[in-house]
């Protein structure tokens, strides 16, 4: 079981949301389940996900925490790990892939460590191993999150950027971060962009 779902149910939910039953998402489900079993009930938890790949979707599908509500944040260390922590105290747990435990599961190890080329992967056997392994691939450690570093950006006043003319939170600086440069991989904005306005919404 993955929380209240059977393995098959969870696989269906994933497929509908993510487009495929990615192995990482299946393992991620067991990781969230393991976290829930190790957290005191009734707390209010935020989540930090240490990878942007797959794992955030498991959190969004199984918990009330999402990128949009900012109860889930990605701090990309590249490690396949999740931290759940109490919003008020910062105390929590971290669930991670315990590398030596992969040795018991050759299909999972081959896929996870990229030892097996994609063409040599046996999808059905890999899924079977993931189901059998469950959360036994993982370990749990206690953590304490520095809440100072997790402060959410408060909205504050909205200003019009003197460079592009678009509204943005004035706390972000004298001009918007896009105009300051180095963030977006494209040029944009009513005065800055070099594209063609396809449609303006006035009168539509
Ligand atoms: Zn701007």
Image: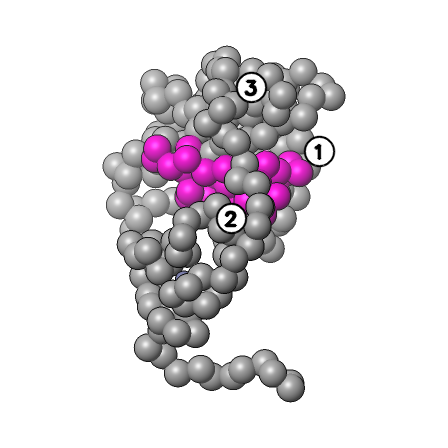
Would you name the residue on which mark 1 appears? 4
Residue plotted at (52% across, 83% down): 199
Image coordinates for residue 83, horizontal then vertical, percent: 50, 26
CA distance for labels 2 and 3:
33 Å
Magenta region, residue range? 50-78
Q: Is residue 22 left or right of residue 70?
A: left
- Name the residue beneath numbered marker 2: 21
Disc 2 vs disc 3: which is toward the camera? 3
Q: Secondary structure at mark 1?
A: loop
Residue 53 at what x, y percent from top left?
42, 43
The answer to whether one can see residue 106 in this image is yes
Q: Is residue 3 left or right of residue 133?
A: right
Q: Quadrant of residue 11?
A: top right
Q: What distance separates the C-alpha of mark 2 from that of mark 1?
A: 18 Å
Name the spot of residue 126 as percent of width and height, x first: 43, 39
Q: Nearer the viewer, residue 88 or 94?
A: 88
What colour scheme does the image use? one colour
Q: Earlier in the sequence, mark 3 or mark 1?
A: 1
Q: Earlier in the sequence, mark 2 or mark 3?
A: 2
Q: Which residue is mark 3?
A: 90
């Amino acid at each position: 079981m993955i929380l209240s779902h059977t393995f098959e149910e969870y696989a269906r939910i994933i497929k509908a949301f993510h487009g495929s039953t990615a192995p990482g998402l299946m393992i991620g489900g067991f990781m969230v389940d393991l976290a829930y079993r190790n957290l005191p009930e009734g707390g209010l938890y935020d989540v930090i996900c240490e990878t942007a790949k797959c794992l955030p979707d498991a959190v969004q599908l199984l918990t009330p925490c999402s990128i949009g509500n900012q109860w889930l944040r990605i701090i990309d260390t590249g490690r396949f790990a999740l931290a759940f922590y109490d919003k008020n105290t910062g105390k929590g747990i971290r669930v991670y892939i315990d590398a030596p435990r992969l040795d018991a599961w050759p299909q999972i190890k081959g896929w996870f460590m990229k030892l097996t080329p994609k063409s040599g992967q046996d999808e059905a056997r890999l899924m079977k191993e993931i189901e059998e392994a469950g959360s036994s691939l993982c370990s749990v450690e206690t953590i304490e999150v520095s809440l100072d570093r997790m402060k959410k950006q408060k909205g504050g006043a909205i200003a019009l950027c003197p460079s592009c003319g678009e509204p943005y939170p004035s706390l972000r600086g004298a001009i918007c971060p896009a105009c300051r440069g180095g963030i977006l991989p494209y040029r944009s904005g009513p005065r800055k962009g070099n594209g063609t306005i396809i449609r303006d919404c006035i009168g539509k």
